[in-house]
Amino acid sequence: MGKVLRFVKLKSWEDYFEEFLLQKELEGLRPRTLNDYRYYIPRFFEGIALENAETITQRVKEYFTQELSPASFNLRRSYIKSFFSYLVAQGAVTENPIDFPKRKDEGRARAIPKETLERLLELPDKSTFAGLRNYTLMLFSLDTGIRPGEALQLLPKDFNVRGREVAISKEVAKTKTSRTLPLSPVVCITVQKLLSSRHPTWKDDVPVFCSQDGEYLQVRSWSHVLARYSKKLGIRVTPYDLRHSFAILYLRNGGNVFALQRTMGHTDLNMTKRYLALDGDDLRNELEKSSPINSLIKPKKRVK
């Protein structure tokens, strides 16, 4: 895995990285993506110099042979490969060391058990802003299946509490296609409580699901919050587990797969079909409801 690099120009990776970020910003990348670059690239280069080709080649091997999920592996690969492509274009390196393919993600989604979700919703201390935010964000995620990165960018103006809907603009949507999602009454009430709890000095450009200081809350921070709750539950829960749980429970409750596709913002129905994976209990319940035998053979009445 990885190629041996030949360096033709001596310049620190930090210098190139600042130029790289500026170019990406000019290209119109979202703040979240820029923040991800700021997170992953420095951690990759930590303790090594750009001109040390052998060290970088070794770091590539170590960094990508860790025990990572396909999603985490592919995410790191994407950001680091992009930066090395920039280095190649600038003449800093002759080849991109990220020359290996993505890991195949089987797309196996999992739904958190209903009992666990009920316990999870009981954990936040709703007497504090952070606790109320956490509770509201959990409810909102389970009601809409929204992507965590989309939810954390929403502003007060995006919510129409009276109309029971939220607008995901193309600037926020991962697919750059706007969509409007309906909201359940209980979620609208909780969102309104959260909006009423905002600090009076916060302006309209402060996200709804912000930090206690009115700062943008990153997905990683939200993951850490759920990780703390997970320790109390004894079951790991991630932001995307809430999205997956919404989708699977939506279908189990009789929801339409095409409606689910639009709600989740999938551009391809194949992405939505991953949630159709049914376990043994699902298949048994569906058989009891839908088997042709039910109409062909009538159950015998018991003789009292």
Image (cartoon, helix red, strand yellow):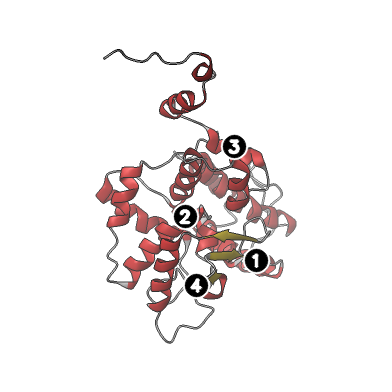
Q: CA distance from mark 2 to mark 1?
A: 22 Å
Q: Which mark is residue 171?
A: 1
**Residue 261's x, y, as percent?**
61, 46
Residue plotted at (45% across, 68% down): 209
What is the residue that sits farthest to the bottom in this orientation? Answer: 201
Under tag 4, what secondary structure?
Answer: loop
Q: Observer-nearest residue: 263 or 61? A: 263
- What type is the residue that disc 3 sits on? Lys
Res. 165 image quadrant: bottom right
Q: Earlier in the sequence, mark 2 or mark 3?
A: 2
Q: Which mark is residue 143?
A: 2
- Whether residue 8 is visible here, answered yes or no, is no
Q: Earlier in the sequence, mark 3 or mark 4?
A: 4
Residue 72 lies left or right of residue 115; in this view the side is: right
Which mark lies nearer to you, 3 or 4? 3
Image quadrant occupied by the C terminus: top left
Give yes or no for contact between labels 1 and 3 (Cβ–Cβ under 8 Å): no
Give yes or no for contact between labels 2 and 3 (Cβ–Cβ under 8 Å): no
Residue 10 lies left or right of residue 111; in this view the side is: right
Q: Observer-nearest residue: 116 or 84? A: 116
Q: Observer-nearest residue: 108 or 132? A: 132
Q: Earlier in the sequence, mark 4 or mark 1?
A: 1
- What type is the residue that disc 4 sits on? Pro
Circle 4 Cα neighbour tier, 10 Å, few/some/many (<14 / 14–19 / ≥20):
many
Residue at label 4? 207
Res. 257 image quadrant: top right
Residue 203 lies left or right of residue 175; in this view the side is: left
Residue at label 3? 273
- What type is the residue that disc 1 sits on? Glu
Under tag 1, what secondary structure?
Answer: loop
Under tag 2, what secondary structure?
Answer: helix
Q: CA distance from mark 2 to mark 4?
A: 19 Å
